[in-house]
Amino acid sequence: MNAVTSLPRDVALGLYRTLYLARRCEEVIVRIYPDDEMKTPMHMSMGQEAVSVGICKALAGNGDVIASYRSHATYLAHTEDHRSFFGELHGRTNGTADGKSGSMHLADIPKGMLGASGIVGAGIPVALGAAFANKQQSPGRVVAVFFGDGAVDEGAFWESLNIACAMGLPVMFVCEDNDLAVHTRVSDRRGYSSLPDVVRRYNCMVLEDESNDVEAIYRLGRYAIEQMMSQKTPAFLNIRTYRYLEHCGTAPDTDAPYRKAAEDAFWKGRDCVAMQRKRLLEGGVPESEIVKMERAIDADIEVSVAAANQAPHPGQDLLYRGVFHEAS
Amino acid sequence: MRRLSFGDAVRECLTQEMERDPSVFVYGIGVPDFKAIFGTTAGLAEKFGPQRCFDTPLSEESMTGFALGAALKGMRPVHVHIRVEFLLLAMNQIVNMMSCHNYMTGGRTPLPVVIRAIIGRGWGQGAQHSKSLFSYFTHIPGLKVVAPTTPRDAKGLLAASIRDNNPVIFLEHRWLHWIEDDVPAESFVEPLGVARVMREGRDLTIVATSWMNVEAMHAAKILAGAGINIEVIDPRTLAPLDIDPIVKSVKKTGRCLVADYDWLHSGFSAEVAAQVSELCFGDLKRPVQRIGFAPTPCPTVRTLENHFYPNAETIVRAVERMLDRPAMDLSGIDFYSHERRFRGPF
């Protein structure tokens, strides 16, 4: 883990760039959330960004994604559009949905960000139909659906896994396994010991990662896509990771009863952003180049926040618009 | 014009829409099998192949989310359920996902999904294969709800539903599949959101849903024999509701009976009654009345089933009360002909 990169320099830098973008956007949210300009719940990705960034980059522009309600990193990794992101979180007309979706339902359908759902596991079935369409219309295109380990307790996960296997659909099931359903551990919720072992009994490729390393996850994603195409099966990726902040909100609830100090220290010792930065430095990328990139992202995010604050809130006419799609 | 059954009209529409647009596909539990959802999907798998007409695992929620995902990628799924009750297993995808996905993307997302489901009375179907559940769907912004009565409307409204860019719940009464009437052979569209005046009259307006139009037309014929002239209106699209022709009719007749094929409490009939009361208050000679299912689960045995479901006799009696007329002698009139032609098994 964390060996000097074997990826091309631009790929390794690109992974870091997007990781940093996702992390920095949320650090800015943490900073400005108390200003109460957003007035909406948020489920922060912080700590887990390597999963979304590694997989979305592995799709290499030829994939669709569906996010869980912990959608920020997935949305940013797939679209890199932080202007619309901050506009939407601020509930302004320069957002993705004029402020009607907020944090939990971020979508950019032309870019293949098909949606995010506040109902746990509800996005999983949507991946099936998108993959069915892709299989006919765009062979080689994959749908990656992100969900937490809690969503695996839902019937929709097992229904969808079975359907994808039975129909041979190009769906990549990506379990962002942070061991927590809100505050409840996997061990308190499951009547079986190993989820990957259960899924292996399906006609599905199963891959696992515990590194929280964006390059390892990226390579896993690339490998999964190759295998899905050659074997005509879906893939299930169980990727262990760790949530830094509270379930909902921007506070680091490190002292909450469900937290374990040793676990916290373990995962923060393998912070995905710090790991990739260290790897770039060890691989000979000058720190000045990295810092220059970071400052440029920082400045651009501030532009997005300012643009969001300056954009108008939607007027009452927009309340009634879009219940039905008008160009029927 | 050529006569066709409602069921064959549905099948002909699906065939023509699949020929017209390669993005249309039809699927659901039992859809391509030899029973073919009471014949309405017969021949589609053979004609269009297994990619465009296929069976599914028994996973209603996920196969409904499947429709949403396919629609997001530009396809036009038609998902079929042999009983509306199975949709209760898919309500998360319908209500939490499909109905609001366009709104949650700022109105930017066409979602051309049709969900066909069979409703109502069959042959001793009991409590779980007998409902309509209209208001479960009409309550939700973002869903269109269509319940055709005539074979012509079945064909034209289904075509309109498939071509619409919104989720449409398309509800077909089991017994309607046998009804025969004139249906154009060519492909055509009956616009959604437009009510149909089934019969003109001056004494009383009946607003009827689905099968209750058949009963209302039967009742109107009986009442005509006593000199009572009934207007019957089929909303056809329950949401969005075309209230204007109903208001126009009630302003003319001064009396409104809502004959719903569903429970009354918090039902579609309550919505119609409320709107008519608000919009026709000064013209009403009597309060709006409603008839519908008995407020019980649906029993299985026929003697109780006959009391559970309203029919033309129920309508005749309600109309007589609203017009202060004495009860007619209805002996010798056959009120259950459709039920008796059905020999099951389902």
Image (tube, coloured by chain):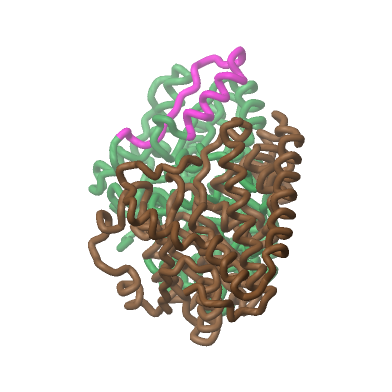
Tell me if residue B156 can be seen.
Answer: no
Res A58 → quadrant: bottom right
Q: Quadrant of the C terminus of chain B?
A: bottom left
Q: Residue at x 72, y 60 (%)?
A: A293
Res B329 → quadrant: top left
Up the image or down, B191 lies above or below A40; here it is below
Would residue B168 be found to the left or right of residue A1 on screen? right
Q: Is residue B273 magenta?
A: yes
Residue toward you, B14 or A170:
A170
Residue toward you, B105 or B224:
B105
Look at the image and give the residue range highlighted in magenta.
B268-295
In the rendered image, residue B168, in percent from the top left (x then y), is placed at: 57, 51
In the rendered image, residue B154, in percent from the top left (x then y), is placed at: 58, 54
In the image, which lettered chain appears brown?
A
In the image, which lettered chain appears green?
B
Would residue B342 be found to the left or right of residue B37 on screen? left
In the rendered image, residue A117, in percent from the top left (x then y), is placed at: 51, 51
In the rendered image, residue A46, in percent from the top left (x then y), is placed at: 51, 52
Q: Residue at x 41, y 76 (%)?
A: A206
